[in-house]
Image (cartoon, grey):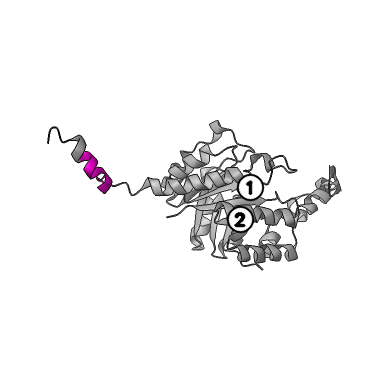
Amino acid sequence: MSITIIAEVGINHNGDMDICKQLIDVAVKTGCDAVKFQKRDIDQVYTQEFLAEPRESQWGTTQRDQKEGLEFNAEQYQEIEDYCKEKGIDWFASAWDLKSQEFLRQFDSKYNKVASAMIVYEDLLKMIAEEGKRTFVSTGMSTYDDIQKAVDIFREANCPFELMHTVSTYPMRSEDANLNVIKTLRDKFQCDVGYSGHEVGRSISVAAAALGVTSLERHVTLDRTMYGSDQTASMEPTALRVLVGGIRKIEVAMGDGVKRIIDDEKPIAEKLRAHFA
């Protein structure tokens, strides 16, 4: 089974459709299977007091200005959908509230995503599960009980899903990765398990691939120095291309686990063992 590699655009597009399309192009050119975005109704996700607080940004002087500047509207999401279809890549988004999940239903995305912050939002999980799309469920900041409740919701709805081992720090330190949790989740919940990484570099993601994840998600950026809270935990195009290439080699290299003498070994064995044959 091939690993589904997801390029997490998130909000790294900075509200700019040109940047967004460049990031989709990066995902296509590097061999990713899908691109993912984030959708928020800011009046549902944030308090009015918070939105009124001062914050200098390219969009204005308040938190509201900044948050609104990062959100795409329906017309822009339709442009994303059309562009992804043109480029031959799947797209989907993680909703952070009920209105946003309802908003996303007007589009023809293949998957759903539960962000780590939302895994305890049971009303949202039920809404997602009733759609019946394969759903990636990130498990950062959650307990086994939290995960079990989410698993129960998707199983009761007969909705296909997989968990994603996640550590919700940006960027994540190597010593916090705890990749053995991948096997723990697989054994405990008897389901497919992926990996959503926020580390700097490729090694940890490569190791996750070797542990048999069924999906792997990394944030993508044009330049890690760009404006945005997720940029430093993201991969630039060259690094992403190397990562995807490495993962595809690992998929082939893992094999079927059956010990055998391959045909190319036979003449070598005959030559090296000739003195005692």
Estimate how packed mark 1 is, as few (under 14), some (14 to 19) or many (20 or more) residues with alpha carbons within 10 Å.
many
Near-viewer residue (168 or 228): 228
Q: Is residue 9 magenta?
A: no
The N terminus sits in image quarter: bottom left
The residue positioned 46% from the left and 38% from the top of the image is 180
Prevalent SS, magenta region? helix
Left or right of residue 239: residue 11: right
State the mark number for residue 35: 2
Q: Are marks 1 and 2 in contact (CB under 8 Å)?
A: yes
Residue type at mark 1? Val
Image location of residue 218, percent across then percent down: 58, 46
Residue type at mark 2? Val
Estimate how packed mark 2 is, as few (under 14), some (14 to 19) or many (20 or more) residues with alpha carbons within 10 Å.
many
Alpha carbons under labels 1 and 2: distance apart: 9 Å
Magenta stretch in the rendered image: 259-269
| Pointer 1 or 2: first along the chain | 2
Image location of residue 191, percent across then percent down: 44, 52
Left or right of residue 57: residue 185: left
The residue positioned 47% from the left and 39% from the top of the image is 207
Residue that badge 1 annotates: 220
Residue 106 quadrant: bottom right
Near-viewer residue (111 or 251): 251
Image location of residue 233, percent across then percent down: 64, 40
